[in-house]
Image (cartoon, helix red, strand yellow):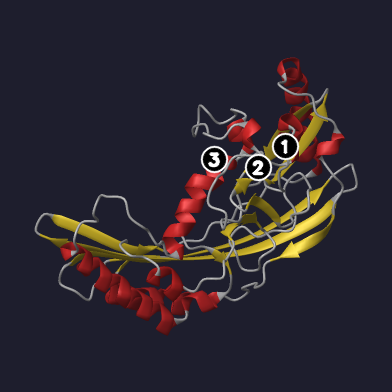
Amino acid sequence: RVIRDLNPESNHTTLDHGIMVEVLVNGQFGYFAVNNISYDSINYAANKAYTQALNASKYSVYSFDESVRPKSVGSYQSPYKVKDIPLEHLTYTLIGANGKLRESKKIVSAISMARLVDMNMKFVSTNGSDFSQSFMYVGPGFRSIAQDGNIVQSRSYMDQCMQAGMEVFEENKVLERCESICKEAVELLSADECPTENMDLVLHSDQMLLQIHESIGHALEVDRILGDERNYAGWSFVNLEDFGKLKYGSDIMNITFDPTIPKEFASYGFDDSGMKATKEFIIKDGVLLRGLGGLESQERSNIDGVANFRSCSWNRAPIDRMANLNLEPGDSSIDDMIGSVEKGI
């Protein structure tokens, strides 16, 4: 549901389903996906995946065996499962939010949106694996764009997806948030430019998550370090020999991979190789320990990894994808941290 400048812009529902068949032939994995889940269709997919793997095995960069597909049985479900979504009330809430986003005459455009994704997956394998996972993703999005002469600024709360229920769109909280977004967008029009010099910097969580995502998450995806993504999304400054000794941050910096935290966007029980998801320290006391690599990358690189070999849909083969990276808390309060800054931002 999307409201832009008080007008409904998008109001649609999409249904998508299908099956991916994976085979292992001569040490090479092959995949084929179909959106028809009849017996004949699945058999067709299996034969196509077999032929693909057989042909590709002549050029394999690494020969795998079944050890990179562990047996797992179980289930995972998001903490909340929204059955009856009050779409009419949700639309009215978004319209009210859009009004709050436009409360100043200096706001030239505003958008309010809601995205809800209900996803169910079943994983079975000839090795005995049999598990199911159900996810409910809820994502709000709000933005105000302000203009004063040739100066344009925006303030937003976007892409903060989580596994939650409709409490995310509780009307009073939404309106209060949008009122602040509008106010801050206008304030940015006359705010001083951030000075350019060496000083302390205190980042709040909404900016810190981006710092972790870019500086740690992508850089430590092992398939990227191995070079698999160099032609698509870039390489990494981290080398395989850095694990266990690279000083990534200060002694109090501890980064964990933890898909077991309830309500987080990338929480799950198993990755798409069947590996069980567990909390692991990626960086401990500032030193790099593990990569963000599933069992295939761990086998190829000979470094410790995590359960993050995941596909984004039924018609996409899994790759190493970051999930739930967290900067572990220290023992200082926000007042302590800000109070310790002599000069900074």
Query: Callout 3, which amino acid?
Result: Ala
Residue found farthest to the top: 58
Q: Which residue is drawn at 74% across and 58% down?
A: 269
Name above or below for residue 132 compared with residue 54.
Answer: below
> Mark 1: which secondary structure?
loop
The earlier-in-sequence mark between 1 and 2 is 2
The earlier-in-sequence mark between 3 and 1 is 3
- Mark 3 near mark 1, Cβ–Cβ under 8 Å? no
> Mark 3: which secondary structure?
helix
- Mark 1 near mark 2, Cβ–Cβ under 8 Å? yes
Q: Which of 240 and 69 is in front in this view?
A: 240
* Residue 177, picture quadrant: bottom left
Bin the neighbour count of mark 1 within 10 Å (Cα to Cα): few under 14, some 14-19, many 20 and up: some
> Mark 2: which secondary structure?
loop
* Residue 144, picture quadrant: bottom left
The residue beneath circle 3 is 219
Q: Residue at x 50, y 27 (%)?
A: 231
The location of residue 173, given as percent across then percent down, is: 42, 81
Q: Distance between the residues labelled 3 and 1?
A: 15 Å
Is residue 105 visible in this depiction of the protein? yes
The residue beneath circle 2 is 291
